[in-house]
Image (cartoon, rainbow, N blue to C red):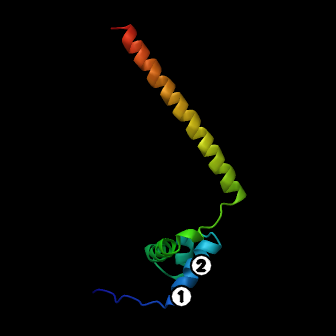
Amino acid sequence: MAQKRKKFSLEFKDEAVRIVIEQSRPIAQVARELGLVEGTVGNWVNANRRAHPAEKAPLAVSEQARLRDLEKENRELRMKTEFLGKAAAFFAQEYR
């Protein structure tokens, strides 16, 4: 037997989204606390982010540091990949 879909007020949805975004809490945790399915809250959060793209929360200091580290690692890996590609091309010519 199919369950009836629950209807939630706009205020309830906005409050759930606000908790996730402003408190940087995981969607799954907020959904559990509110007795909802994680996908439902996720849909609300995604819809809010699409409707308000400029309202992204700034990164925390630790997130900024992590982003810098990842960008540096990415640059280093690109340089290594480029070097290995050139070395492989060089050695391929040597053995022809």
Residue 12 numbered tag: 1
Q: Amino acid at mark 2?
A: Arg
Residue in the picture at 48% in, 24% down? 84
Residue 54 is left or right of residue 41, and the answer is right
| Residue 45 position within the rendered picture, expressed as x and y whole percent measured from the top left | 50, 74
Say above or below: 82 vs 61. above
Which mark sits nearer the N-terminus, 1 or 2?
A: 1
Say above or below: 82 vs 21. above
Q: Element type at marker 2? A: helix
Q: Quadrant of the C terminus?
A: top left
Q: Element type at marker 1? A: helix
Closest to the observer, 55 or 31: 55
Q: Can I make out residue 48 in this image?
A: yes
Residue 31 is left or right of residue 22, and the answer is left
Kindly check if marks 1 and 2 are in contact, taking CB atoms under 8 A apart as contact.
Answer: no
Residue 53 numbered tag: none
Residue 10 is left or right of residue 6, and the answer is right
Q: Which residue is mark 2?
A: 18
| Residue 69 position within the rendered picture, expressed as x and y whole percent measured from the top left | 65, 44
